[in-house]
Amino acid sequence: MAAHKRGMIDCAFCRTPCPETEADTLAMVQARVAKKDPEAINMLGQKYFHGEIGLQKDLKKAVELWTEAAELDSIGALHDLGDVYRLGNGVKQDIAKAAELYEKAAMQGCPLSRHKLGCIEAQKRNFDRAVGHFLISSMMGHKRSLEHIKRAFMAGIATKEQYTHALKGYQDAVEEMKSHDRDEASALIKS
């Protein structure tokens, strides 16, 4: 939004004109992949997973690309791999491997991966560990984790102090992320 306000309609990262066709988009992504850009590799994996920008849906190729990006420390790729192993999407379902991948992403600051670790622990009935993950994720601004802690508190699993701490942390995180440009961009997306 800030770049757009300054009249910059090019790519906010590389300053080249935004591609107009799917073929141009694919070429731009592949150029970054050739340079071993972990986020471009992750994005190409997503495009194969969903069958976008002119690519055929190919779950095996998506997993290969996400694995490569994860080895290059892409947090998004770690999370995406966690999802495919948790759900058995294109790979044999492996909850332990999913948890391992989510943990790596969570340790690098991914609140959604931290939330999913909490869900895995809750399914295993390790409620103390689940609440711990939800608490950390809540304090990073993840709303569903806050909702899970609230439900855990109402069920007698989490303490009032944990819920209060999560709520305060969530509110602080949301306040810290507020900006006029972010609000304006959200309004544009919703309209």
Image: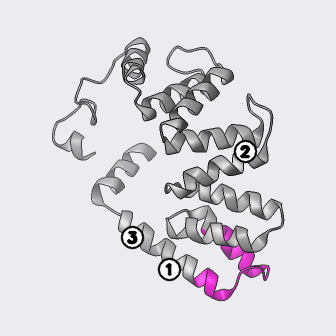
189 vs 159: above or below = above
Query: How far across and down, in percent of the image, does residue 122 sit?
Result: 78, 64
Residue at horizontal 47 percent and vertical 74 percent from the top = 171
Q: Given this view, does label 1 or label 2 mark the residue nearer the observer?
A: 2
**Under tag 1, what secondary structure?**
helix
Between 99 and 22, the one lying in front of the other is: 99
Alpha carbon distance from label 1 to label 3: 11 Å
Residue 141 can be seen, yes or no: yes
Q: Given this view, does label 2 or label 3 mark the residue nearer the observer?
A: 2
Which quadrant is home to the C terminus? top left
Q: Which region of the structure is painted magenta?
A: 146-164
| Residue type, mark 3 in image | Glu
Mark with earlier residue (2, 3): 2
Residue at horizontal 48 percent and vertical 36 percent from the top = 72
Residue 178: give its label: none
Mark 1 burial class by Cα count in 10 Å: few <14, some 14-19, many 20+? some
